[in-house]
Image: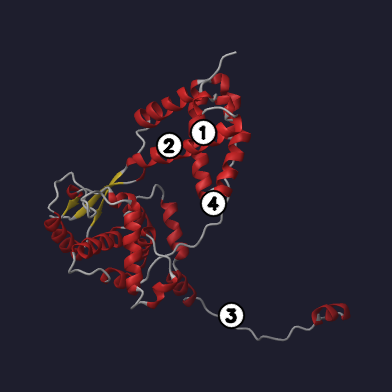
């Protein structure tokens, strides 16, 4: 009976499928890598075998289901994280099914596993006063303060994702006619986002102080290395805490770099920008993704209800017509 070594197919999946054929982004590869690292460790314990000794048939639908449940319990993963792990596993089994028709039935059972439904939470964003307070928080007399002001202003104006922000190079900022920032978004799709005049001056000053080569990171740490996600989250958290001393509404909000991205989108929406333009601005794959900002926009809803006429009717008292109904009403 033919055996199918998991290690051989998994290595080919990463090098041939993700790397050469799909040209997946480093972020996607890292996410898939972490998923299979966790899955292999779990499977090794369950099958009592070293990861290199595992066969593809050892990773069946039941094991995958138990693995997904385990990471929810032991790692505190939510439904979104669980579904991301499942998407990576499905992608691998699609690859196996195409290359090994004999394993089609085995793969189909994994591919048929449904994603877990989850509640869509209302998005968080900052209003105009909160945005101004956060931007004003950094101390411009220090190098860190000038760097952080540039980070906050650029994020709040362009809506860049944190991964897009930290991968920017000095050459990605164009400050001549039609000033804009270039970034590589999800799916390795490059886009250009215009920059306002206030951002142009700040970024020009920062580039002059940064004195970096064209291919070097735009924003760096004390050691001169590229900022990490955690570092940017720390910068945002620190300045929001400072801003909350003068802007009390920030004290009840949990502000992350992604909240700044949401805030940029809401500013565009309040400015009357069409949602198709907002989708292009943010690098959304579909205009439907941008729809969530419309659902979250209370100002737009308040304007809509203000245009409606109240129903003019006298409010009479309800009187039950039956003794039994009267009894129930009195309970």
Is residue 279 placed above or below 6 in the rendered structure?
Answer: below
Q: Check disc 1 and report the residue beneath it.
A: 40
Q: Residues within 10 Å of mark 1 (few under 14, many from 20)?
A: many
Q: Residue at x 41, y 75 (%)?
A: 249
Q: Nearer the viewer, mark 1 or mark 2?
A: 1
Query: Can residue 100 be seen by looking at this rendering?
Result: yes
| SS at circle 3 | loop
Contact, CB < 8 Å: mark 4 with mark 1? no
Q: CA distance from mark 1 to mark 3?
A: 63 Å
Q: Residue at x 38, y 26 (%)?
A: 16
Identify the mark nearer the N-term, 4 or 3. 4
Identify the mark nearer the N-term, 1 or 3. 1
Q: Check disc 4 and report the residue beneath it.
A: 76
Q: CA distance from mark 1 to mark 2?
A: 10 Å
Contact, CB < 8 Å: mark 2 with mark 4? no
Q: Residues within 10 Å of mark 3 (few under 14, many from 20)?
A: few
Identify the mark nearer the N-term, 2 or 4. 2
Q: CA distance from mark 4 to mark 3?
A: 49 Å
| SS at circle 4 | loop
Q: Nearer the viewer, mark 1 or mark 3?
A: 1
> In the rendered view, does 96 fall on the left or right side of 60?
left
Along the line of sight, the residue nearer the viewer: 175 or 49:
49
Q: Check disc 3 and report the residue beneath it.
A: 311
Total residue callouts = 4
> Which x, y percent locates residue 290?
41, 56
Quadrant including the C terminus: bottom right
> In the rendered view, does 33 fall on the left or right side of 154?
right
Q: Nearer the viewer, mark 2 or mark 3?
A: 2
Q: Check disc 2 and report the residue beneath it.
A: 33
Q: CA distance from mark 2 to mark 3?
A: 59 Å
Quadrant including the N terminus: top right
Along the line of sight, the residue nearer the viewer: 124 or 290:
124
């Amino acid at each position: 009976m033919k055996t199918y070594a998991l290690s051989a197919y998994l290595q080919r999946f990463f090098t041939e499928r993700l790397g050469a054929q799909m040209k997946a982004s480093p972020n996607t590869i890292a996410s898939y890598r972490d998923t299979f690292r966790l899955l292999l460790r779990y499977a090794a314990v369950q099958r009592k075998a070293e990861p290199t000794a595992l066969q593809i048939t050892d990773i069946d639908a039941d094991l995958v289901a138990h693995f997904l449940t385990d990471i929810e319990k032991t790692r505190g993963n939510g439904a979104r994280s669980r579904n991301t792990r499942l998407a990576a596993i499905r992608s691998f089994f699609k690859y196996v099914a195409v290359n090994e028709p004999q394993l089609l039935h085995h793969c189909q059972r994994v591919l048929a596993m449904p994603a877990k439904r989850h509640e869509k939470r209302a998005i968080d964003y900052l209003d105009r006063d909160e945005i101004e307070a956060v931007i004003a928080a950094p101390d411009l007399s220090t190098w860190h303060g000038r760097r952080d002001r540039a980070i906050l202003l650029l994020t709040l104006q362009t809506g860049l994702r944190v991964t897009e922000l930290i991968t920017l190079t000095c050459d990605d900022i164009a400050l001549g006619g039609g000033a804009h920032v270039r970034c590589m978004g999800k799916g390795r799709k490059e886009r250009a986002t215009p920059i306002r005049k206030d951002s142009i001056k700040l970024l020009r000053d920062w580039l002059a102080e940064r004195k970096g080569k064209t291919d070097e990171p735009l924003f760096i740490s004390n050691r001169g290395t590229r900022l990490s996600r955690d570092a940017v989250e720390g910068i945002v958290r620190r300045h929001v805490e400072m801003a909350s001393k003068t802007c009390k509404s920030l004290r009840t909000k949990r502000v992350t770099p992604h909240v700044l991205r949401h805030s940029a989108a809401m500013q565009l929406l309040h400015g009357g920008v069409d949602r198709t333009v907002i989708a292009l601005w943010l690098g959304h794959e579909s205009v439907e993704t941008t729809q969530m900002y419309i659902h979250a926009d209370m100002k737009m809803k308040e304007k809509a209800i203000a245009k409606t006429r109240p129903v003019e009717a006298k409010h009479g008292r309800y009187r039950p017509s039956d003794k039994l109904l009267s009894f129930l009403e009195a309970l």
